[in-house]
Amino acid sequence: GQQLNQSPQSMFIQEGEDVSMNCTSSSIFNTWLWYKQDPGEGPVLLIALYKAGELTSNGRLTAQFGITRKDSFLNISASIPSDVGIYFCAGAINTGTASKLTFGTGTRLQVTL
Amino acid sequence: DGGITQSPKYLFRKEGQNVTLSCEQNLNHDAMYWYRQDPGQGLRLIYYSQIVNDFQKGDIAEGYSVSREKKESFPLTVTSAQKNPTAFYLCASSRNRGGGSYNEQFFGPGTRLTVL
């Protein structure tokens, strides 16, 4: 099955810095989701996007649904140590039934003090 | 508390043995899913179920089996036919949020299976 391309694969940043990551696909999705996973735990849903061009925020997190419907972006402002983890994007087609999410390969974020 | 539980957290089995992983949810979600995660990789779909007594193969169903006898339960059996069963297994569920969209999936804490 397809996996989405996430960039960068990993990043080291200092506390207080802003972070940007993106996710690209060769095919169109009509839903984009962003998850965060801590080591040894299940992913936690951060933001869901449903319309091309949509910009949605959740606290310090902001995500955008790309106009082409083949990409999505996640920004984290003023990073803090608890932002450490792996961030996954996921795309889906709304079929009206149980959905098959296609996941990205993940961006590993490490925050230094 | 509403949520998804998976048990056990860690599971060890000998090669050639079947093993069943538990997944229970009390969110009243219709749809449930099983994913497999290997080190440094994203999640890959094994099986999913829209309603009780119905389930569909995902991208990597070979060597796995599931059942959905109750809405809140979706156990996964890793059979001896699965060539590389050692992995982190994640269960998820979702509901119809309107417009037929089930896309917002919520995950359990995972079970790490190691086959010796």
Image: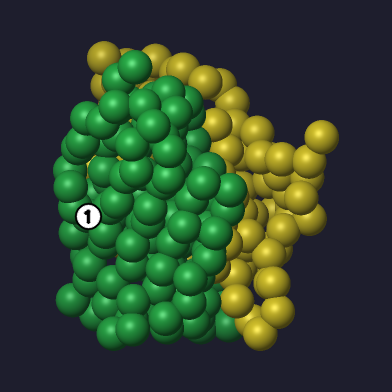
Chain colours: A green, B yellow
Q: Position of residue B98 (x, y in %)?
A: 70, 79
Density class for disc 1 (Cα within 10 Å; few <14, some 14-19, many ≥20) is: many
Q: Is residue B67 visible in this depiction of the protein?
A: no
The N terminus of chain B lies in quadrant: top right
The C terminus of chain B lies in quadrant: top left
Rendered view: A58 above or below B97: above
The reply, left or right, for residue B45 in relation to residue A95 is left
Q: Give residue B51's quadrant in the image.
A: bottom right
Q: Position of residue A5 (x, y in %)?
A: 19, 59
**Which residue sits at x=37%, y=56%?**
A74
Rendered view: A62 above or below B75: below
The reply, left or right, for residue B66 in relation to residue B39 is right
Rendered view: A27 above or below A62: below
Q: Is residue B50 visible in this depiction of the protein?
A: yes
**Which residue sits at x=60%, y=76%?**
B101
Report the number of numbered marks: 1
Residue receiving disc 1 = A6
**Which residue sits at x=58%, y=48%?**
A59
Q: Secondary structure at mark 1?
A: strand
Q: Amino acid at mark 1?
A: Gln
- The one nearer the camera, B91 or A36, is A36
Q: Position of residue B35 (x, y in %)?
A: 41, 47
For disc 1, the chain is A
The reply, left or right, for residue B22 in relation to residue B90 is right
**Which residue sits at x=29%, y=51%?**
A20
Q: Position of residue A70 (x, y in %)?
A: 27, 77
